[in-house]
């Protein structure tokens, strides 16, 4: 396939106190998130002067990608657009159209499947293209990369570096805790099911960009988010430390079940069972944005302190050169026939999702999402 541009797509975050509420309304519009939860999250942002670190991290990543492309190719102009805050995807896509871009490859700052981590980004790209209208470039999303060596390597090194800072304890008293953003259970059940069924059903997987011609038929239908996280956790684990996969940053109405256990509950259970120290590895995230610096470095660290647990949080990839190289590799996979698809784990990947893959969960009491942004 011929591509003439690269697009970095991120979540976006506020960059000043006045941005916080409009940003939160963009994120939660039509999602049934209670007002009390919004007020609470607004407070988290205010602890940092209303500035999320995420946009600065996206700028740094874009600069690193641009530099990497300039050094060794591919010769593609680079763009950046966000789902929930400036620079909005619609404005970026309009700029791309005005620059004459016809077909772009999009790298999304979430490595995983599920509605929130994959489909919603595709929906927002489609909405941005519709808003731009005539001449908007075609935009193809790059595949999931949770088990790419360029994602596994930085997380694995970070765990080892974090572990080295903890005081020594008796064997078994130090644990590794992997964490990712929680999602509603119904969203988790539906994650990946449609594409997986299509791939295993007609055996046409190889022509659709699946890593292996024969997808693993033992793969459970749905639950792609948890399966990918579990796959990565195994790859990052040190071999001698016991580990767990837990979830953080639960949102939504309290009566809706979300993936658990929550990291704070889990730390409490560990401490009761004799754990003395934890390394917390945020494998769900590529950079130290607010869900990391607040929900882990502030909240979970306080929980650990109150329990007398030694606590250290491992770094995220950020602009690690291996992670930047991975992004370049993922582009080459799509532009150079036969380019190897690097993967260390066991979960098949594909380039194009089935249209019915990772549907939005039913949201009790939630209004439909309007078509305008901001
Ligand atoms: C799976 C997932 C990821 C990982 C994949 C990815 O990276 O995309 C992620 C990332 C992020 N989530 C973020 C922020 C927020 N997420 C919220 C709410 C929600 N997240 C959800 C899921 C996820 N979220 C869901 C199911 C909701 C409920 C509303 C809904 O059903 O859609 C809310 C609303 C308030 C609240 O927390 O209730 C905020 C402010 C930020 C930016 C941090 C910063 O500013 O630095 C980032 C990177
Ligand atoms: Fe979120």
Image: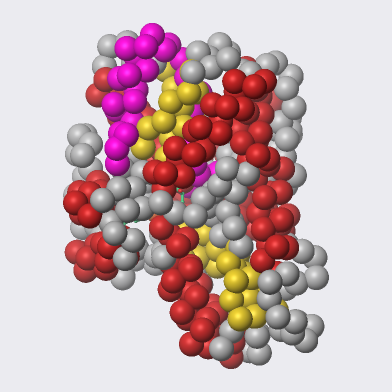
* Quadrant location, the C terminus: top left
In this orientation, does residue 148 appear? no
User: Which quadrant, please, contains the N terminus?
Assistant: top right
Q: Position of residue 305 (x, y in %)?
A: 51, 84
Apparent side of residue 124 relative to residue 202 in the rendered image (left or right): left
Left or right: residue 73 compared with residue 234? left
Q: Is residue 104 magenta?
A: yes
Looking at the rendering, the stretch of residues picked out in magenta corresponds to: 85-114
Q: Residue at x 59, y 76 (%)?
A: 311
Image colouring: secondary structure
Q: Quadrant of ligand 2?
A: bottom left
Instruction: Give the residue displayed 57% in from the left and 27% down from the top.
Output: 67
Residue at x 44% of width, y 22% of height: 139
Q: Position of residue 124 (x, y in %)?
A: 34, 34
- Nearest the viewer among 23 and 53 is 53
Q: Residue at x 20, y 34 (%)?
A: 372
């Amino acid at each position: 396939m011929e591509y003439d541009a690269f697009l970095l797509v991120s979540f976006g975050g506020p960059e000043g106190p006045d941005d916080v509420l409009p940003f939160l309304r963009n994120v939660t519009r039509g999602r049934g998130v209670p007002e009390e939860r919004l007020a609470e999250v607004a407070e988290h942002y205010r602890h940092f002067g209303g500035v999320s670190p995420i946009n600065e991290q996206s700028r740094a990543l874009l600069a690193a990608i641009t530099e990497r492309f300039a050094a060794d190719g591919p010769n593609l102009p680079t763009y950046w657009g966000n789902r929930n805050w400036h620079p909005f995807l619609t404005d970026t896509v309009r700029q791309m159209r005005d620059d004459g871009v016809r077909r772009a490859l999009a790298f999304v700052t979430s490595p995983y499947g599920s509605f929130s981590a994959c489909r919603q980004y595709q929906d927002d790209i489609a909405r941005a293209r519709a808003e731009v209208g005539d001449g908007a470039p075609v935009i193809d999303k790059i595949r999931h990369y949770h088990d790419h060596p360029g994602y596994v390597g930085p997380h694995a090194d970070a765990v080892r570096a974090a572990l080295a800072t903890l005081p020594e304890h008796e064997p078994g008293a130090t644990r590794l805790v992997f964490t990712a953003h929680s999602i509603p259970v119904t969203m988790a059940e539906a994650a990946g099911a449609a594409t997986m069924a299509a791939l295993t059903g007609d055996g046409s997987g190889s022509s659709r960009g699946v890593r292996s011609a024969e997808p693993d038929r033992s793969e459970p239908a749905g639950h792609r988010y948890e399966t990918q996280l579990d796959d990565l956790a195994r790859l990052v684990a040190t071999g001698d430390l016991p580990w767990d996969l837990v979830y953080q940053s639960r949102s939504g109405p309290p009566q809706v079940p979300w993936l658990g256990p929550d990291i704070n509950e889990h730390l409490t259970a560990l401490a009761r069972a004799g754990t003395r120290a934890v390394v917390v590895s945020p494998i769900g995230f590529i950079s130290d944005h607010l869900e990391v610096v607040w929900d882990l470095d502030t909240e979970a660290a306080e929980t650990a302190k109150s329990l007398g647990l030694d606590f250290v949080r491992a770094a995220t990839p950020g602009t690690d050169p291996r992670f930047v190289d991975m992004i370049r590799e993922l582009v080459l996979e799509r532009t150079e026939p036969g380019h190897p698809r690097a993967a260390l784990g066991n979960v098949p990947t594909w380039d194009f999702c089935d249209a019915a893959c990772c549907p939005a969960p039913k949201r009790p009491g939630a209004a439909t999402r309007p078509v305008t942004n901001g």
